[in-house]
């Protein structure tokens, strides 16, 4: 697919788990994505952006995956039409074993959905062994050939995944000491009786089979999107979980003494720890010296694999390539450090406080060194992607050298209108955005437009009626409303409901000069759902689902009319 900033594009961002497909089992899957692609193509939305789709651990966060490569089995479409080894009888039998609410309502119930899909895939694998493997059919040969091509990551992941199932957790530090790295685990397994080794070999083959099915389905949906002229945009988190197959297989490329994250930011005020210290993601830092000696082999593999599924992708927190904020404690200790001042915190860590790595940004030489460091790491990744395929999420506390560096590398960055300021107060007009950029009002971490607007309106109304809000808060809310409205090209003469400004806000984003305008699905529909609150640990994170199935989105005459007008406006630019 040819992608160039010369052609403006608009698109939609939707977490895959949040989509409701025609035949999903309580979580969005490849089938739901295919329906979304069809819907997007019919409404002239040429980009469909997703969150990471790698397999997650027990916290279900797509940004804390247990593998930098392995796809999440939850994304597999489980119908007899989409999986040749599955029958309708098997599917109904396994569904009957699990109590589950209707997939048409409620959030994702991971405690039901995960074991249900694992059980269905296990039955499918057993049938594959009986019908294909033992008979050495063309399909079994295709599986073997595929597995051989994945030698760089699949065997290690399969061993890790079987150990994870054996001990009920991805936390390898809770496994028996002799199984905590790939090398020691393989040595332990080699010493077991033949019957045990054969059983483990079969279990690892099942993991490989599941990945084969997942990668096959994703390749098919990628081809389907390409045929409709829709580009799939993926997501690579900068870090990978400490409790991942990657660390299990190659601990030497990670620095587990430091935990990656981000410094305090005004946009995220979720809890005391986040406000005081920032976000502690728990990802280990990289040993860049080791990775450079290997010509960034691990990162190159990661990029090559994501290119097999997506036409273009963003790197979440691309700032980490230049410098990454590190914590000298694991997230499990965040509550302990939340109320502490810097002096007491330093005493408890033996003299360390959260800081940037490899250098702070305090002096010109340090900033220059960080810029050179980032460019040295990003250039090899661009060799793997080609032009305009890699997009950097450059939001948060952005050093002044990062965006000029990305522009020199021809990497598109992000523009969130409320954060793009000139003269510290006025929003930068959209027609001044660099063409090589992606504009959006919100990501999965941010409040939806409706929530933002309604909070401002509530403060204004309360202030004018003499209720809770004081004059300062009222004036601040009016200021925010008017400058956003001015940016989008309309006036706010009085208190206005969100429905009165919704379309104007969307059209304002389309009118900016950015190459791609992406609408968060909640902003497109004007709903209040939020998929993640940074720093918060709640069941609602990563489990909210969009109320209506994708197949029913076209039934909304108002939305179809809105999208038609937006498409017409885009075609005139």
Image: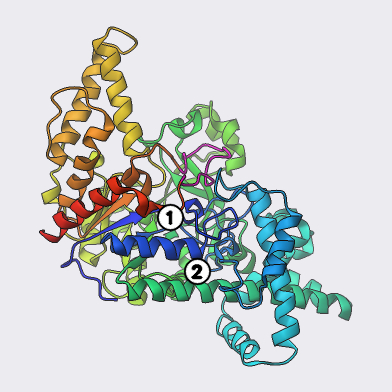
Residue 391: say if magenta.
no
Say if 456 sits above or below 353 in the image.
above
Displayed quadrant of residue 389: bottom left
Marks 2, 1: nearer the viewer: 1
Q: Position of residue 412 (x, y in %)?
A: 26, 60
- At 35% from the left and 60% from the top, the residue drawn is 39
Query: Does dot 1 land on a helix, a strand or a loop?
Result: helix
Q: Horizontal placement of 345 versus 133: left or right?
A: left
Dot 1: few (<14), some (14–19), or many (≥20) neighbours within 10 Å?
A: many
Number of residue marks: 2
Q: Decide which of tag 2 and tag 1 comes sooner along the chain.
A: 2
Residue at which label 1 appears: 550
- At 28% from the left and 11% from the top, the residue drawn is 470
Say if 216 sits above or below 418 in the image.
below
Magenta region, residue range? 531-547
Q: Position of residue 146 (x, y in %)?
A: 57, 84
Dot 2: few (<14), some (14–19), or many (≥20) neighbours within 10 Å?
A: few
Query: Does dot 2 land on a helix, a strand or a loop?
Result: helix
| Residue 388 shows in this picture | yes
Q: Position of residue 56 (x, y in %)?
A: 58, 57
Residue at which label 2 appears: 290
């Amino acid at each position: 697919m040819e992608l160039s900033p010369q052609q403006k594009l608009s698109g939609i961002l939707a977490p895959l788990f949040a989509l409701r497909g025609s035949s999903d089992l309580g979580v969005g899957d490849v089938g739901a994505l295919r329906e979304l692609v069809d819907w997007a193509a019919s409404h002239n939305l040429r980009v469909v952006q997703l969150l990471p789709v790698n397999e997650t651990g027990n916290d279900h966060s797509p940004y804390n995956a247990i593998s930098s490569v392995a796809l999440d089995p939850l994304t597999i479409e489980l119908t007899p039409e989409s999986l040749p080894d599955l029958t309708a009888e098997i599917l109904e039998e396994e569904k009957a074993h699990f109590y589950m609410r209707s997939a048409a309502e409620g959030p994702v119930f991971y405690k039901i959905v995960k074991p249900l899909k694992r059980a269905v895939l296990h039955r499918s694998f057993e049938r594959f062994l009986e019908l294909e493997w033992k008979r050495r059919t063309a399909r079994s040969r295709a599986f073997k050939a595929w597995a051989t091509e994945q030698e760089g990551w699949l065997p290690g992941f399969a061993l890790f995944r079987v150990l994870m199932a054996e001990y009920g957790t991805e936390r390898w530090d809770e496994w028996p000491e002799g199984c905590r790295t790939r090398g020691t685990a393989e040595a332990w397994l080699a010493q077991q009786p033949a019957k045990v080794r054969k059983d483990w070999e079969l279990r690892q083959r099942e993991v490989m089979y599941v990945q084969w099915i997942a990668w096959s389905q994703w390749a098919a949906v990628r081809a389907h999107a390409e045929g409709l002229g829709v580009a799939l945009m993926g997501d690579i988190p900068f870090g990978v979980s400490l409790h991942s197959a990657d660390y299990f297989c190659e601990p030497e490329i990670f620095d587990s003494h430091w935990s990656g994250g981000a410094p305090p930011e005004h946009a995220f005020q979720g809890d005391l720890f986040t406000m005081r210290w920032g976000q502690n993601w728990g990802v280990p830092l990289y040993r860049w010296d080791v990775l450079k000696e290997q010509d960034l082999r691990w990162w190159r593999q990661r990029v090559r694999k994501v290119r097999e599924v997506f036409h273009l992708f963003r790197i979440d927190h691309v700032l980490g390539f230049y410098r990454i904020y590190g914590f000298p404690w694991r997230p499990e200790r965040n509550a302990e450090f939340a109320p502490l001042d810097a002096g007491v915190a330093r005493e408890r860590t033996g003299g360390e406080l959260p800081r940037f790595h490899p250098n702070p940004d305090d002096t010109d030489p340090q900033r220059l060194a960080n810029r050179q460091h980032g460019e040295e790491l990003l250039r090899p990744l661009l060799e793997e992607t080609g032009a305009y395929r890699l997009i950097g999420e450059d939001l948060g506390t952005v050093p002044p050298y990062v965006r000029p560096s990305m522009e020199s590398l021809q990497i598109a960055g992000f523009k969130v209108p409320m954060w793009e300021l000139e003269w510290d107060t006025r929003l930068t007009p959209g027609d001044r955005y660099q063409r090589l950029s992606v504009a959006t009002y919100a990501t999965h971490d941010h409040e939806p437009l409706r929530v933002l607007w309604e909070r401002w309106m509530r403060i204004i109304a309360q202030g004018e009626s003499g209720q809770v809000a004081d004059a300062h808060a009222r004036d601040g809310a009016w200021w925010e409303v008017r400058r956003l409205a001015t940016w989008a090209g309309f006036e706010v003469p009085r208190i206005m409901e969100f429905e009165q400004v919704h379309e104007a806000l969307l059209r304002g984003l389309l009118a900016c000069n950015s190459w791609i305008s992406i609408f968060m699905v909640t902003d497109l529909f004007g709903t209040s759902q939020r998929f993640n609150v940074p720093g918060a640990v709640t069941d609602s994170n990563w489990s909210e689902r969009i109320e209506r199935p994708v197949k029913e989105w076209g039934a909304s005459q108002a939305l179809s009319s809105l999208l038609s007008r937006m498409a017409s406006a885009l075609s005139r630019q």
